[in-house]
Image (cartoon, helix red, strand yellow):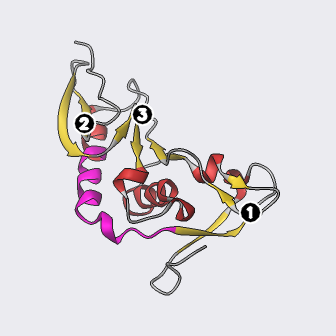
Amino acid sequence: MPVPAPSPISTLAIFKLKADGRFSLNRVVVPLDTTSIDAGKYLPHIPKNQFPGQALTVELYREWGIRAVEIGSLMFGGYDPVTGEEIAAPKELVRLAVPRRVFTGSHLDYVADVIQRITARKGEIRGLKIARQATYLRHFTIELEELTDRTMKVK
């Protein structure tokens, strides 16, 4: 049975892999863009210059041990060479790279359950600010700090 492709504007879909190789749909409200979570829509309270994709990636790993990758302003953004202002990426995505032949259905159920837990308290997730970065390929060596109530307004 082929996996139905979610609409880019869909907000429902996390697929669970069953033991027989078929997928079932676990209804979780998550904005999707192809196979990635659209963190910009999922965490609308975090502006692009506070890296919502990376904030979600950190939350997934720190609290639940789930590895993901941010594909957004941290990876593809940068600075305008003339003005020095931050240039945001067009989208703030988080990709959960799940090789289906390695993980079991219970692994994918765990990911879906974790996203449901995060959704229940996603308003508590804070943005991030850059503490240090390299001139080139900053997303490999960057150091980030989580924003607090005092530091929420970052230019």
48 or 21, nearer to the observer:
48
- Label 1 belongs to which residue? 133
Task: Give coordinates of residue 1: x percent, y percent.
Answer: 22, 12
Q: What residue type is labelled 1?
A: Gln
- Comparing 75 with 21, the one in front is 75
Check if residue 122 falls in the magenta segment. yes
Q: How many marks?
A: 3
Task: Residue under label 3, please give it.
Answer: 98
- Taking 59 as reference, is 78 left or right? right
Q: Pointer 3: residues within 10 angstroms few (<14), some, or many (20+)?
A: few
Q: What element carries label 1?
A: loop
Q: Amino acid under label 2?
A: Ala
Of the two numbered discs 2 and 3 on the same chain, state the one appearing first in sequence. 2
Residue found at x 46% / y 45%: 94
Q: Residue 13 carries which label?
A: 2
Q: Secondary structure beneath disc 2?
A: strand
Q: Position of residue 40 (x, y in %)?
A: 43, 52
Q: Are marks 3 and 1 in contact (CB under 8 Å)?
A: no
Magenta-drawn stretch contains 72: no
The answer to which of marks 1 and 2 sits earlier in the sequence is 2
The quarter of the picture where residue 109 lies is top left
Q: Is mark 3 on a helix, strand or loop?
A: loop
